[in-house]
Image: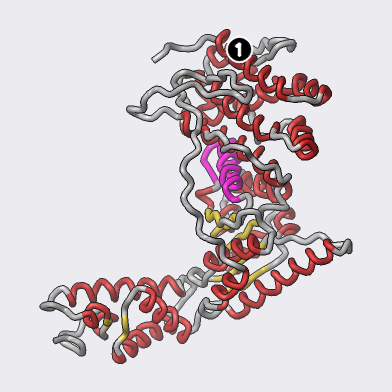
Amino acid sequence: MRGTMTASEVHKQYSEAVTAFRKLIPDPALRMSFSRQVDGYMRQYVLGVWQADNASAITPRHVEFYNAIYSSGNPAPSALYWEVATGVAGFDLFQPPSFFADLRQYDRRKGTTLARRFADQLTLILLLFAAVDDVVSESEAGFVNACSDTLLALCDRDGLKSDRPALNAGDFVPRRSAPPAPEPKGPSGTSTAVHPNLGKDKQEADQPQKEPEPTLEELLAELDGLCGLEKVKKDVKSLINLVKVRRLRQEAGLPVPPMSLHLVFMGNPGTGKTTVARLLAKIYHAIGVLSKGQLVEVDRSGLVAGFVGQTALKTQEAVQKAIGGVLFIDEAYALVNQDSGNDFGREAIEVLLKNMEDHRDDLIVIVAGYTQLMEKFIHANPGLESRFNKYFFFEDYDQDQLMDIFRSMCKKNGYTLTPSGEEAAQGVLQELYQKRDENFGNAREVRNLFEKAVARQCDRVAGLDNPTKEQLMELLPGDLTEEPTPGGEGVQ
């Protein structure tokens, strides 16, 4: 294992990496713009890397590394310790460099891949400075990946294809007992090793065979197959029709008024909000609204951290995972339901609003929760009110629908209800429904009943000698109640 790198070695590697990329830019004006701006942006991004690791642990060595960030022809910085420490503590959000838009525009015109190659080069450079303490931490790698993902999302939005997989900063986090790996190569083939101990280039993994994506008709059939939710189903289909007609008007050269596709799902727990959100993400992908159609589900804990600046990074990472699909925020009201006016949840909301604007063509946010609390949440911020103007209300299931859900769970998992077993299940669900309060869990109550019934059935069947297939499948009245009935039908 090689010892600590010096600031002069770091400068040499940085300068070589920037020079190698500069040589790839054919356009003189674009090359000059890149050369003039790159050092300033890189200094800012390095401050963000160090903040992600531990903003309070800035050392004189960090200052030496910071002052090593200058490329050929540009002046060297001479920052003092307090300037670097203050810069680290005050780093806000990652913003793409202004020349990155010019790179993407050039790629669109010429069919090149400069923008994506810069994203890889940025990853390598930031990893070089993450290793100021001779190791790249998980938090530093997470920040670097979030920066790269932001740039790549812009490339995806512009339809710029990749000729190779992007680098993953996580591959450079040291693993125990990991063998040393070769130095990564820059876009020109020149070595751009970020540190001998950082690992290796990301190798293209064998991709598993993808299953065919479901058609719109199949997704709508799956939606129709959900128990209840008639009003929600109707609203979803109206939304699909709205999107289709807007597209037809665009193709016909007709004006299309602005429209937000972000949604508010209101209702009690267990009413199918997450299931519908997952289906809606796939439907939007099937009709061309979203590029991927994945659902990323989070709650307050998935967006908010306990330290200044970390909430923005955590929220940004969640957004990056959701670009191309749907970000589903359950119990979203918790972001503003805090006593303190300085609660970090408000910081998460600001980051969300900015990303909803920046990625309005390929990101849909669905916020969900109890009806009254969600109304307060939306009205807590003018930005939320302007972006969320479509509301889906999920009603509680009635007794018959709860029973249909129970039958469906039995069928899906290979269980059958005897006639008296069905009567017992109806009795239990009727009692649950009639005694429901604001904490009633709807389909979650049904799942709890089913799981307890299966557990009791296992205890009962385990006492039988050579149980038949029918006995392994059937649920008896005693399996549906707290006190199993001895004997009973089906017992030999």
Quadrant where the N terminus is found in the figure: top left
Q: Main secondary structure of the magenta part?
A: helix
Q: Nearer the viewer, residue 367 or 340?
A: 367
Q: Position of residue 189 (x, y in %)?
A: 59, 22
Residue pointed to by mark 1:
11
Quarter assignment of residue 464: bottom left
Q: Is 71 left or right of 271, judged from the image as shown?
A: right
Is 101 situated above or below 31?
Answer: below
Residue 248: image location, x then y, percent: 80, 66
In the image, is residue 315 part of the stretch drawn in magenta? Answer: yes
Q: What residue is shown at x 21% (from left), y 90% (from top)?
A: 489
In the image, what residue occupies the spot 39% across and 74% down?
A: 412
**Numbered disc 1: secondary structure:** helix
In this picture, which residue range is highlighted in magenta? 304-322
What amino acid does circle 1 point to?
Answer: His
Residue 372 seen anywhere in this rendered image of the structure: no
What is the crowding at mark 1: few (fewer than 14 residues within 10 Å), some, or many (at least 20)?
many
The residue positioned 74% from the left and 25% from the top of the image is 25
409 to the left or right of 225? left
Can the viewer see residue 390 in this picture?
A: yes
Question: Where's residue 187, x and y in %?
Answer: 62, 25
Quarter of the view holding residue 71: top right
User: Disc count in the image?
Assistant: 1
